[in-house]
Amino acid sequence: MKIQFVDLHAQYLTIKSEMDAAIARVIRDSAYVRGPFVDKFEQDYAALFGVPHCISCANGTDALYIAMKIMGVGPGDEVITTAHSWIATSETITQTGARVVFVDTDRDTFTIDPTLIAAMITSRTKGIIPVHLYGQAADMGPIMEIAKQHNLWVMEDCAQSHLARFQGKLTGTFGRVSTFSFYPGKNLGAYGDAGAILTSDAELARQMTCYARHGGLTKGEHVIEGINSRLDGLQAAVLNVKLPHLQKWTAARQRIAARYNELLAGVGDVITPPVAPGRDHVYHLYVIRTEKRDALMAFLKERGVPTVLNYPVALPFLKAYAYLGHKPADFPVAYSHQSRILSLPIYPEMTDEMIGYVVEQIKAFYARA
Ligand SMILES: *Cc1c(COP(=O)(O)O)cnc(C)c1O
């Protein structure tokens, strides 16, 4: 049996007729950049979260950058974020001219450890960016509390956490702003790049919209210099077809994760991904830990099971951040995770047979080793 890490085509086949018709309508109407399909997506996405404003943009990285620019982040400022994420989270801080301040993660949830945040706050700190990594909500209770005490904004990076909740409340509804990616492999994915920002702050929403459209909301008038970061009509149409299925697809991911948890319990030294009380997990990625990571990864590859490292080097240890001079002892948890984590295949269309095959190969590895 040949397993794929993610099978986007399998999902397309389940919605093919709707999808083909939706794409044809965009072409019929030449509604390529912004337009009615984009408006519909912004309205529906905001409504799903019960938040008044959704500002669509070109990708999830721009969403982070636009939000920080408009919140006034710039040279001389510091922004706190997690040591374990995709580089988009931290590179956009640097793009604004501010300095990235990393905080280590929690051993079980891979999300920022709130007990370590206060020690990193200085007079230059402007905000905190928690990431709901792999799809599990970060510990938003204490994070919001610390932010409030120190008068900092919180911006949630929800690129991996569509519909995940913290104590029953959706991720993306805690921070002053929250950002989403609809990169094709994300839990809600377009057929190209796409992103969005959510906020309840009308003035911030207006300014972010303006900045993302060359600094102007009416033709010919540019109140500031902005950037070009627009959602295109084809991507919006794709997202409009997929959005009504998101709940069902999320439940499928959770069912697959539960099946993995059950079948992998007690297998070798595998630690399945724990979920902290009060938080839920939408399993953008299903990440196990093992001391034999590299050998297991190679074995699985031979047996037709692709796995991925998300991410092989924690952010502070990337070459890009060598200038910060961090040592492993500064972020012991993120450092220890980077050589132990392994992402197994997961996507809503995965069958029990496929899950069974993946688990059998993992068992075969430990039987041999
Ligand atoms: C995917 C991702 C982003 C960036 O989104 P793009 O749409 O690829 O620009 C940001 N943060 C995290 C945690 C991500 O996983």
Image (spheres, rainbow, N blue to C red):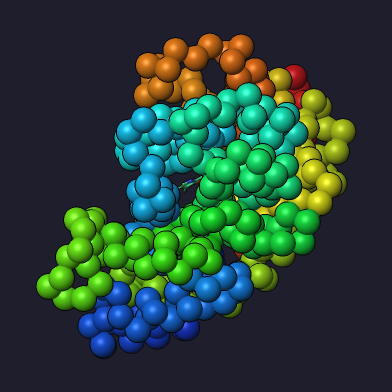
Quadrant of the image occupied by residue 91: top left
Q: Image height check: is 122 above or below 306?
A: above
Where is residue 261 shown, x and y percent of the image? 80, 45
Q: Image height check: is 159 above or below 245?
A: above
Residue at image position (45%, 69%) is: 202
Where is residue 78 shown, x and y percent of the image? 45, 32
Q: Can the viewer see residue 9?
A: no
| Front residue (pair 173, 76) | 76
Q: Is residue 235 left or right of residue 110?
A: left
Residue at image position (77%, 61%) is: 168
Q: Image height check: is 362 above or below 286?
A: above
Where is residue 267 shown, x and y percent of the image? 83, 32
| Front residue (pair 218, 362) | 218
Quadrant of the image occupied by residue 20: bottom left
How many numbered marks are there?
Answer: 0
Which residue sits furthest right? 266
Residue at image position (26%, 87%) is: 29
Where is residue 56 shown, x and y percent of the image? 39, 66
Q: Is residue 283 left or right of residue 232?
A: right
Quadrant of the image occupied by residue 367: top right
Residue at image position (25%, 72%) is: 217
Q: Can the viewer see residue 327?
A: yes
